[in-house]
């Protein structure tokens, strides 16, 4: 699964990297957790890419209770095309979820050692995501998203049996083009990212608390 990640770059830097004409207000975050606001990129049919702030944890438009989003922070690649919560979004509402790294925890006896995983070049990248909009009885709209996960590559399997789908930059246009609905074009993108392009190192237990949000979350360290 993917349960915690970071995005320490500025909105202006991200807009340039992801070829978005207008950025949105964004405060760098080093410890993003479910139900918090994350940064996404969408592309309406025939229009330019847009940055949007969304709640992490997908709330389907038909949901009666928005709390369902707490259970839908991830979507499995193997079933995303058939699960009622995700299948329409896969056809119609795909997004990039912007990040520069994510965390996993390794069980070591009675404790868990956190690790930080990012690209070797340190550049921002994108998880394959889905989004939806939900409206409460008072008419307030919430836009929310989920991260698609797949089987782990050789680097991640040490920590977990799942990893987030990281899209190649060359595949962004295909994933964002909502005019494309053929599963035989979309599902092949949902594969493990090449491990040789990633790096991982241990960080301190400071990151364990989602309330801790500073560059110290990414500082190398091992807790005894």
Image (cartoon, grey):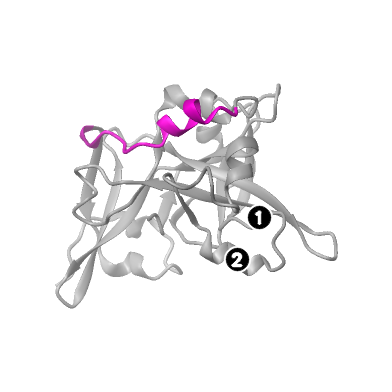
- Residue 61 is situated, as x and y percent measured from the top left of the image, at 71, 54
- Residue 128 is situated, as x and y percent measured from the top left of the image, at 47, 40
Question: Badge 1 local density, few (<14 within 10 Å), some, or many (20+)?
Answer: many
Tell whether position 82 is magenta.
no
Name the residue rendered at 59%, 55% in the picture: 58
**SS type, badge 2:** helix
Residue furthest to the bottom in view is: 110
Q: Quadrant of residue 170?
A: top left
As rendered, which of 32 and 27 lies closer to the eye?
32
Q: Is residue 161 left or right of residue 45?
A: left
Q: Which residues are magenta?
A: 181-196
Pick the quarter of the image with the C terminus. bottom left
Pointer 1 and pointer 2: residues touching (CB < 8 Å)? yes
**SS type, badge 1:** loop
Residue furthest to the right in view is: 138
Reading the image, the residue beneath label 1 is 60
Q: Which mark is residue 111?
A: none
Question: Badge 2 local density, few (<14 within 10 Å), some, or many (20+)?
Answer: some
| Gap in angstroms between the C-alphas marked 1 and 2 | 8 Å
Reading the image, the residue beneath label 2 is 68
Q: Earlier in the sequence, mark 1 or mark 2?
A: 1
The answer to whether residue 17 shows anywhere in this view is no
- Residue 43 is situated, as x and y percent measured from the top left of the image, at 64, 30
């Amino acid at each position: 699964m993917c349960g915690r990640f970071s995005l320490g770059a500025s909105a202006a830097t991200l807009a340039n990297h992801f070829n978005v004409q207008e950025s949105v207000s964004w405060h760098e975050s080093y410890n993003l957790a479910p139900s918090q606001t994350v940064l996404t990129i969408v592309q309406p049919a025939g229009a330019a890419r847009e940055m949007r702030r969304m709640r992490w944890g997908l709330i389907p438009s038909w949901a009666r209770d928005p709390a369902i989003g707490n259970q839908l922070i991830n979507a499995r690649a193997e079933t995303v095309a058939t699960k009622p919560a995700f299948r329409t979004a896969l056809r119609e509402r795909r997004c990039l979820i912007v990040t520069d790294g994510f965390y996993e925890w390794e069980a070591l006896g009675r404790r868990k050692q956190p690790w930080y995983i990012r690209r070797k070049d340190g550049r921002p990248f994108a998880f394959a995501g889905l989004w939806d909009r939900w409206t409460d009885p008072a008419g307030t709209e919430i836009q929310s998203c989920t991260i698609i996960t797949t089987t782990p590559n050789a680097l991640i399997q040490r920590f977990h049996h799942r990893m987030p789908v990281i899209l190649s930059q060359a595949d962004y246009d295909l994933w964002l083009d909502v005019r494309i609905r053929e599963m035989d074009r979309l599902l092949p993108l949902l594969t493990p990212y090449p491990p040789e392009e990633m790096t991982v190192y241990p960080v301190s237990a400071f990151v364990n608390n989602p309330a801790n949000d500073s560059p110290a979350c990414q500082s190398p360290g091992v807790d005894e």
